[in-house]
Image (spheres, coloured by chain):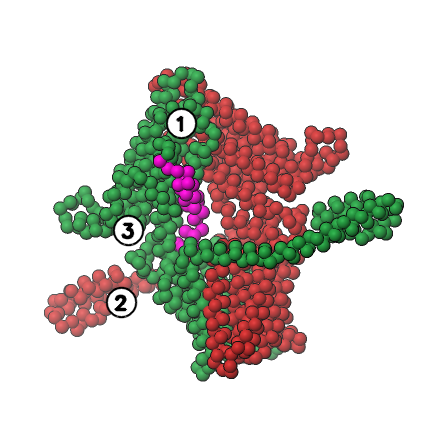
Chain colours: A red, B green
Amino acid sequence: MVDCLSVKAGEGEGFPNSDGKSWFFPHSNLAMDIEAVAAATEERAGVFAGAWGWLKGLPEKLKNKAVEVAKSAKKLGQDDPRRVTHSLKAGLALTLVSSIYYLSPPFNYFGVFGMWALLTVVVVFEFTVGATLLKCFNTSFGTLCGCALGIGANNLAYLFGDKGPPIVEIILILLFLLGAVSSFIRFNPRIVKSYDYGVLIFISTFTLVAVSGYRTDDILQLADKRLFTILIGGATCLVISIFVFPVWAGQDLHKLTVSNLEKLANYLQGLGGQYFNEGNVTTGDMAALVQGYESVLDSKSDEDSWANFARWEPAHGGFHFRHPWKQYPKIGDLARQCAYHIKALDDYINSDDHIQAPLMEFRNIIRESSTKMSSESSKALKELALAIETKTDPSAANPHVENSKTAINDLEILALQAATTENREDVLAIIPIVSLATKLKEITKCVEKISESVHELSRLAHFNSVEPTISPERPQLVHAGSVVPVSDGDSIDHVAITVHA
Amino acid sequence: MVDCLSVKAGEGEGFPNSDGKSWFFPHSNLAMDIEAVAAATEERAGVFAGAWGWLKGLPEKLKNKAVEVAKSAKKLGQDDPRRVTHSLKAGLALTLVSSIYYLSPPFNYFGVFGMWALLTVVVVFEFTVGATLLKCFNTSFGTLCGCALGIGANNLAYLFGDKGPPIVEIILILLFLLGAVSSFIRFNPRIVKSYDYGVLIFISTFTLVAVSGYRTDDILQLADKRLFTILIGGATCLVISIFVFPVWAGQDLHKLTVSNLEKLANYLQGLGGQYFNEGNVTTGDMAALVQGYESVLDSKSDEDSWANFARWEPAHGGFHFRHPWKQYPKIGDLARQCAYHIKALDDYINSDDHIQAPLMEFRNIIRESSTKMSSESSKALKELALAIETKTDPSAANPHVENSKTAINDLEILALQAATTENREDVLAIIPIVSLATKLKEITKCVEKISESVHELSRLAHFNSVEPTISPERPQLVHAGSVVPVSDGDSIDHVAITVHA
C-alpha cells in the first residue's frame, strides 16, 4: 500500500513507474499485496488505455496539425504574395549554384571549396535587395579582411617563431586576441545594426586561414578559392535579387509610412462617425480601424531595418540613391506617438468614466467641434499620406492642421461655457468634456508634428511642389496637376469611411 | 559663360567636373573662353588646395577618430563589465577548439572538417546562457535533420535514377524544393524568433550532404564527422558559457523589469518635488529621471528576446526551470504604456499650455492631492519592484494604489469646486487643472494594471507570501520578515528622492 501510494505520488512528479516492485516488497502481507497488485493492474490498464487512446487520436491530431500548418502557410502567402516569389527565387539561386558545382571541368578546381558558394547563397539571399546587398558587402569585406589578417598572422608566426610548436602558440594567441576583440566589437549597437554578420565572417575566415595555413601550407590558394567561390555565390544572389521580381526595402518603407498615416486618419474619421454621430460606422468597421492603429504601434522594428537596408539600394522606382531614408523612421516615431494617444482616447471612450455624465447632453455639447477636429485631423493626415505617396509638396495639409487646432480651441471654450453655466450639481458633466478635449488636443499636436516632419522630408527629398498660388499662369501647374492624382481633390471632401485593412 | 554656369550647377548635383570641355566649346567667343579658363584654373587650384588641406589634416583626424573609438569602447565596457568577460570567454572557446584541432593523432581524422568545430564556436557563442543553448539546439537539430534528409535524398536519387545525369537532376530538383520551402518557413514570425538559425543550418547541411554525396560517395562518414565536430564546438561553448562567469538571460530580464518599475517610481517621486513643491529637486536630477523613463520606452526588444532565451535556461539563482518568464514582457508592456503617459505629462508640464493660468494660484489648488497621487503611485511602483526583486508577495503595494486613486478623485472634486467658485473671467484657470488631472488619472490607472500584472506573476511563480495579517502568531512571520529586507519598511515612508540612474 505504501509502495502503491509512493508510485502514485511518484507518477505525479514524473518519476518512472515502478509498480512491478510491489511483488517482492519485503514487509508486505497478502492483503497489502493483493491491494497493491490490483492497484498496479488497474494503473497499468489505465496507462495502456491512455496510451491506446493517445495512439487512436494520433492520426486525427496529426491531420488537425497539418491543416493548421497549411492554413498558416496559406495566410503567410496571402498576406504578401512576394514571399512565395522570394522562396522560389531562393530555390532557384541554390539550384543554379549547385549546377555550377556539378559542371565538372572548370569548377572541379574548387573541390570542397565549391561548398562555400552554396553556403554563401543560403546565408546571403535575403527578402529585400538592400538586405542582400548589405549581406554581400559584409561577406566580401569580412572575407577579405579575414584572409588578409589570416595570411599576415601566418607570416608573422613563421617570421618570429622557430619550427614546430612556437608557431602554433603564436597563432593561438592571435586567435584568442582577435576572437576576444571581435566579440567585443559586436556589442557596439551601430555594428550590430549593419555589420554584425561581417564581423562573424571576418573571424571565421581568419580562423580558417590561420589554422589551415599551418596544416596545408597553401594559404594563398585557399584564400583565393574562398574569395572566388563566395563571389560566385554572392553574385548569383545579387543578380536574382535585383532582376527577378525585385523587392525594394525603400519602396516598402515608403509604403509603410503612407499606410501608417492612412490608418491613423481612418480611425479619426471613423471616430467622428461612430462616437459623435452614432450609427454611421458599424462595430465591425470600428474594430478594423482599431486594428489599424494598433498595427502602427508594432511597426517600429520593420521601419528601422528597412531604413537601414534602403541606404544600400541603387536608384529604383523614382527614388534616387541618396534618398533621405532616415527621415521615414522619424515620421514613424511621431505616428506611433499619435497612435498611443489614440489608444488612450479609445480606451477612455470605451471605459465607464465618461458615462457618469448625462450621455446625450454631453455629446451634444461637444459634437460639432469634436467632429470637426477629428475630421480635420483625419484630412490633414490623408493629405500628408498622399503627399508622401505621390512625392509632392505636402502644403495642402496645412489648412486642415490649422482648422483642427481651431476646432480644439472651440471645444475648450465650449467646456468653459458649460463649466460656468451649469449649476453645482451638474458640474460632474464637465470633467468628461475637458478630459476628452485634453486627449483630442494631444492628437492634434501630434498631427502638427507629423506635418512638420513630412514637410522636412519633402524638403530633403526635393518633392515636386504643386505651386498653385505663386504663379498660376505658368504651365508647370498642369504638370503638377498630372502628378497629383484626381482622387486627391475628392478625398478632401470625402466623408464616407474607407477601410484600408 | 553658359558652360561655366552649367559646370557649377552640375557640381551641385554631384555630376563629374567637366571644365576641360570649355576649350572646345563651338559657340564660345574669346571673352567667354577667358572667363571659363580663369574659372576652371581657379577651381583646379581650389581642388588641389582642398586635397592638400585634407592630407595635412589626416593625422589629426585619424588621431581624433582613434580617441573616439577608444572612448566608445571604454564606455561599452563600463556600461556592462560582463561584456569584457564575455569577449575573453569567446576568445578562450576559440583557442580551446583550435588547440584540439592542432592535437594531431586523434583529431587528424577529421581533417578539413575540424573547421566546422571552429565555425560552430564562432557562430554559437552568445552573450547569455539561454541564447547559447538555443543556438546549440538549433545547430544540432538543424544538422541532424539536414544530414538525415540529405542522405535520404541521395538514396532516393540512386533508387529512382539511372547512372549519370538523372541523379544530378533529381538532387537539383530536391534542392530547389527544399530551398524554396525553407525560405518560405522563415517568414513565419514564430520560426524567426527562435528557430531561424536552425532552418539556415538545416538547408546548408542538406545542401552540403546532398551535393558532396554524389561527389565523394561517403556521405555517412561526412555526415558523421560534421555532427561530431559540431558537437565538440557546441559542447565547448556550452561548458564555458555555463561555468565561467555565466550571464543568465532570465536574471537580466528580472533585473530589467525591476529597474523599469523603479525608474517610473523615481520620476513620479521627483515630479512631486519639482513641479508641485519647487526647489527640492534640481534640474539635473530631473533630467536624469526623464532619461530614466525614456529608457523604459526603449526596453521592449531586450525584454522580448531575453524572455525567449530565458525559457531555455536551467534552474539558476532562485529561478526554477519553468519560471513564468512570459509574464515579464506583459509587465514591461504596461510599464511602457505608463511611460508614454508620463511622457505626455512631462511634455505638458514643460509646454506653455498650463502657464496661461495664474501659475502659483493654480499650483496651490492642486498641490496637495497631486503630490499625494504622485508619491502614492511612486510608492506603489517601488513596492511592486521590491516584491519582484525579493520574490515576495506584492500585496504591500495595494494600499498605495488605493490611496493614489483616492487622491486623483480628490483632485477632480477640487477642480470642480474651482470651476464653480471662480468667476467667468478666471475660468481659463480650470482647464490646466482638469488637463493635469486627466493625465495623472491615466498614470494611476496604468499603475493599477501593473499591480494586477505583478500579482499575476507572484501567483504563477509562487512568490513567498509575507502573510502578516492572516496569522500573526505563526512563526512563519519571522521567516517572512527575514525574506523582506529591512529597507522595505523604510522605503514606504521615505520622502527624500533617491535617483537610481
Secondary structure under badge 1? helix
Magenta-colored span: B280-308
Quadrant in the rendering for residue A52: bottom left
Q: Is residue A335 magenta?
A: no
Q: Is residue B165 left or right of residue B386?
A: right
User: Are dots 1 and 2 on a single chain?
Assistant: no
Q: Position of residue A317 (x, y in %)?
A: 66, 48
The answer as to whether the residues below labels 1 and 3 share one chain is yes
* Viewer-side residue, B264 vs B332: B264
Q: Residue at position x 88%, y 46% from top?
A: B30
Q: Residues within 10 Å of mark 1 (few under 14, many from 20)?
A: many
Q: How many marks?
A: 3
Left or right placement of residue A251 versus residue B199 in this view? right
Nearer the observer, B206 or B125: B125
Query: Going 44% across and 76% down the picture, which residue do you hit?
Result: B100
User: Mark 2 and mark 3: span between their CA atoms?
Assistant: 32 Å
Q: Which label is found at residue A16?
A: 2
Between residues A112 and B488, which one lies in front from this camera angle? B488
- State how far apart marks 1 and 3 are (Cα): 38 Å
The subunit letter for the residue under badge 2 reads: A
Q: Main secondary structure of the magenta part?
A: helix
User: For the residue carrying disc 2, how many other residues have a C-alpha within 10 Å: few (<14), some (14-19), or many (20+)?
Assistant: few
Q: Circle 1 is placed at which residue position? A: B434
Look at the picture and state if A189 lies above or below A98: above
Q: Position of residue B240 (x, y in %)?
A: 39, 67
Q: Is residue A357 visible to us here?
A: no
Task: Specify the amino acid type for callout 2.
Answer: Pro
* CA gap, disc 1 and disc 2: 66 Å
Whichever of labels 1 and 3 marks the residue nearer the N terminus, that label is 3
- Label 3 belongs to which residue? B391
Q: Residue A492 falls in which quadrant of the image?
A: top right
